[in-house]
Amino acid sequence: PDGVPMGSFGVRFVALVGILTGAYRMSKRATLQLMQDVFEVPMSLGSVVACQDAVSAALEAPVDEARDFAKEQPVAGADETSWRERRQKAWLWVLTTPMVAVFLIHARRGAVGMHALLGTFAGILGSDRWSAYNEWPIRRRQLCWAHLIRDFTWISEHQGEAERIGLALLAETKLLFDWWYRVRDGTLKRSSFQVYVSPLRRRVETLLEEGTVCGNVKVESRCRGILERFDAMWTFVRVEGVEPSNNASERALRSAVLWRKGSFGTHSPEGSRFVERILTATTTCRLQGRNAFAYITEACQAAFLS
């Protein structure tokens, strides 16, 4: 190990332990064994935890800065997945922007958890139709079309009038995204796209209204739910820089889901803070095309010297 020592360990060694148990989701015992086998450094489980704590402390200030930065952006996406802390149910939330992704573990999945994540954020929020986001103003919300397509597909899988409506909704969606991809590759002007979408939007609204009286109780309920947030489906048409799906937030959570399945969550608030900070640092580095290990090493170096 080289760098400024933390006890008998150097900065790069401490950062490596942190990123192995965090970004690479290795268990503490596996990390301990790797360090002994590869680097011939004897460790205890307590030493692994101490390294995690040191990395977490080093990342506290930059993660706070990343959180403040994300809340100042004009557009962001949010998503959540289940977690456990001290064997109690909790939720891991993420707020994503093109440059930063910030994670939060909170005991609640509802509006309380959402507000804890968003804080002072006042921009346009991309999300699925989870009820926690219903407090967000519709004019500043973008529903995820990937989830809407799943809804339309589900509607089409029913018999009778529901099938016709679902298939028609999927056809309109295909046409919408044919145009959208042309906007993205520069072969269609946004102003023309907006003109094209106007009658399509009316057709989609009519289909959903027909779905509310189609004779299938479940389909009727689903269509009413979508219509309640209908204007939020089209924010990406109106506002440049807004994506029609929340895929970035879902992708940001995939690593966390794998971590949860392997570790069953965290055993303390301190462990949860480590998860939040290491995921924020490594995911943000990936978004920015930066080397996560180099960044965490630099953060530890700065913290140990202060």
Image (spheres, helix red, strand yellow):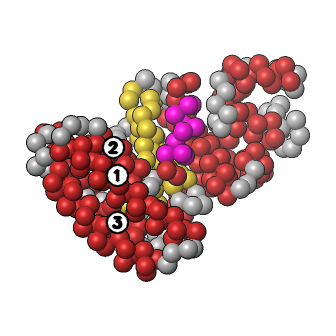
Q: Give the alpha-carbon distance from disc 2 to disc 3, as whole Å.
A: 19 Å
Q: Earlier in the sequence, mark 3 or mark 1?
A: 1
- Judging by the rendered image, the residue that carries numbered circle 3 is 234
For mark 3, give the secondary structure: loop
Q: Give the alpha-carbon distance from disc 3 to disc 1, as whole Å.
A: 16 Å
Say which quarter of the image contains residue 209. bottom left
Seen at 72% across and 47% down, the residue is 292
Q: Position of residue 300 (x, y in %)?
A: 74, 47
Q: Is residue 25 above or below residue 106?
A: above
- Judging by the rendered image, the residue that carries numbered circle 2 is 153
Q: Which residues are magenta?
A: 250-259
Q: Is residue 161 above or below residue 189?
A: above
Residue type at the position of mark 2: Thr
Q: Is residue 24 visible?
A: yes
**Dot 2 crowding, Cα within 10 Å, few <14, some 14–19, many 20+:** some
- Judging by the rendered image, the residue that carries numbered circle 1 is 170
Seen at 31% across and 73% down, the residue is 198
Seen at 51% across and 64% down, the residue is 181
Residues at discs 1 and 2 in contact (Cβ within 8 Å): yes
Q: Position of residue 240 (x, y in %)?
A: 47, 73
Residues at discs 3 and 1 in contact (Cβ within 8 Å): no
Q: Earlier in the sequence, mark 1 or mark 2?
A: 2
Q: Position of residue 70 (x, y in %)?
A: 52, 61
Q: Is residue 47 left or right of residue 231?
A: right
Q: Is residue 72 magenta?
A: no
For mark 2, give the secondary structure: helix
